[in-house]
Amino acid sequence: MIAALMEYTNYLHRVKEEGIISPATWQESVKILLLLLAPTAPHLAEELWERTGQKYSIHNQKWPEWDEVLIKEEDITLVVQVNGKLRDKLTAPADISEDEAKKLAAEQPKVQTFISDKNIVKVIYVPGKLVNIVVK
């Protein structure tokens, strides 16, 4: 959790330096950071909460809400295996269909070297994760 909050802090610092964040968004982002920090570092979070001019106490505030639409990945990484051995990884849209994923995996040059001139017995697809091509 601390590592994720550090990533968030670094991101906030970067966007503030670049000037691509409005003052209102900046204040809301810092407020959320402090709320997320509070369970792990309650005294520090309380002190920073007070210094940012917020109401007493951070521990009486509502937990931040999240929007599932915003966290949905647009792209995924598909692992491509031939006979259970990793042969390639590819980036694909998160909503890729099974048929498209199988076709895309079979077309990869690294995969082609292992399946050309061989009989494809079966293609196993694990949605959003894996395509395994079984050959003889």
Image (cartoon, rainbow, N blue to C red):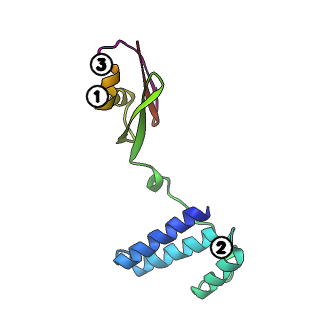
Residue type at numbered disc 1: Glu
Q: Is the N terminus in the top left, top right, bottom left or bottom right quadrant?
A: bottom right
Along the line of sight, which residue is nearer the eye, 18 or 53? 18
* Above or below 64: residue 108: above
Which residue is pictured at 71% across the width and 79% down the height? 43
Considering the numbered disc 1 on the image, is that residue within a helix, a strand or a loop?
helix
The type of residue carrying mark 3 is: Ser
User: Which residue is tagged 1?
Assistant: 107
Start and end of the magenta stretch? Answer: 116-126
Residue designated by label 2:
61
Which callout, 3 or 1, points to the residue nearer the camera? 3
* Mark 3 or mark 1: whose residue is earlier in sequence: 1
> Which residue corresponds to the image point at 47% horizontal and 70% vertical from the top-left?
10
Q: Is residue 124 magenta?
A: yes
| 101 to the left or right of 126 | left
Vertical relation: 15 (above or below) 113: below
Question: Mark on residue 116?
Answer: 3
Q: Nearer the viewer, mark 2 or mark 3?
A: 3
How far from the left and from the top, in percent, is residue 76? 41, 43
Quarter of the image where one finds residue 114:
top left
Q: Quadrant of the C terminus?
A: top left
Q: Secondary structure at mark 2?
A: loop
Residue 38: percent from left, percent from top? 66, 72
**First-in-chain label (2 vs 1):** 2
Q: What secondary structure characterizes most of the magenta part?
A: strand
Marks 2 and 3, the one that precedes in the sequence? 2
Q: Which mark is residue 2?
A: none
Picture quadrant of residue 11 = bottom left
Residue 55 showing in the rendered view:
no
Q: Residue at x 41, y 73 (%)?
A: 14
Q: CA distance from mark 2 to mark 1?
A: 53 Å
Residue 16, horizontal then vertical, whole percent: 40, 77
